[in-house]
Amino acid sequence: MAVDSGSVREGLTSAHDGERNRLLNALPVDEYDRMLSELRPVHLPLKEVLIEPNVAISHVWFVREGVASMIAHDQGGGLIEVGTIGREGFVGLPLLNGVDRMPYEVLIQIEGDAWRMPADAFRRIIDERPAVRHRCSLFAQYFSDQMAQSVACNRLHTVDERCARWILMTHDRVDGDQFELTQEFLAIMLGVRRAGVSVAMGVLQRSNVLTYVRGRVTVLDRDALETKACDCYRITSEAQRRLFSE
């Protein structure tokens, strides 16, 4: 049976228009088609480890919903989040620069789903397709800016402000106003003990901007929550808007 090329093109365009990963959605349709040939859908369960420290990276993941955290381990056994990746980008950035490992762990802090691609296929595509490499490089710059801003944020702002910022960043990367976020992850995100998390979330709850019950966050007033966050949220949000305006 002959394949209707018009129908195939229409289906591809529809898939591209509906793509939830913003990096993939920003690619030209033909580049998106090339990526799709190597992508496979996967579920991202809570706490799944995508990348282990100093272990060869086997795949890249283009997150469609959910949040992956890049975690630094210190010699004393402490953990702190150094960056987050959601639907705006992909996990596996070192591969973009010809490096196959990194000293950080990447794990899922908010359950979701993604496209997964073997590392070798990703290397081939970015070598063959300048437009794909360019888009991935823009994301790499945004992620670097996000990490730098997080360092400043941890040094300059209160736990309450930082907590509001991280809640907003998570809210941006999920569908709806509710999501699971454990005290354990919040403590890692903020670099504080769980007692500090309880205090910060208590402040936000008393302000009626959210509720936090048994690890489930419900955002009640998004605009008011933004007023509680430090200016770092606005700075990183503007950087992300620039990422997708090019």
Image: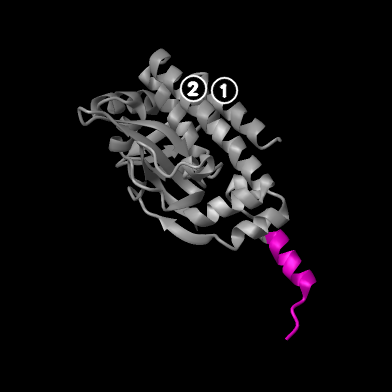
Relative to 63, 200 lies left or right: left
Quadrant placement of the N terminus: bottom right
Residue ID for mark 1: 235
Q: Give x and y (percent) for residue 179.
A: 42, 44
Is 6 one of the magenta-colored residues? yes
Compared with residue 68, is residue 231 higher up or lower down, i.e. above or below? above
Judged by its main secondary structure, the magenta piece is helix
Circle 2 Cα neighbour tier, 10 Å, few/some/many (<14 / 14–19 / ≥20)? some
Residue drawn at x 62%, y 44% is 133
Q: Which residues are magenta?
A: 1-14
Which of the 4 image quadrants contains residue 208? top left
Task: Identify the image quadrant of residue 31.
Answer: bottom right
Of all residues, the one furthest to the left in this rendering is: 76
The residue located at (43%, 58%) in the rendering is 43
In the image, what residue type sits under mark 2?
Answer: Gln
Q: In the image, residue 116 lies at what x, y percent?
A: 49, 56
Q: Amino acid at mark 1?
A: Ile
Query: What number of labels is visible?
Result: 2
**Which x, y percent locates residue 93?**
49, 41
Q: Is residue 5 above or below residue 206?
A: below
Q: Secondary structure at mark 2?
A: helix
Instruction: Give the residue pinned by disc 2.
Output: 149
Question: Is disc 2 in contact with disc 1, using a CB cutoff of under 8 Å?
Answer: yes
Tell me how far mark 2 sits from mark 1, CA to CA. 8 Å
Residue at image point 24% right, 29% down: 78
Q: Is residue 88 left or right of residue 44?
A: right
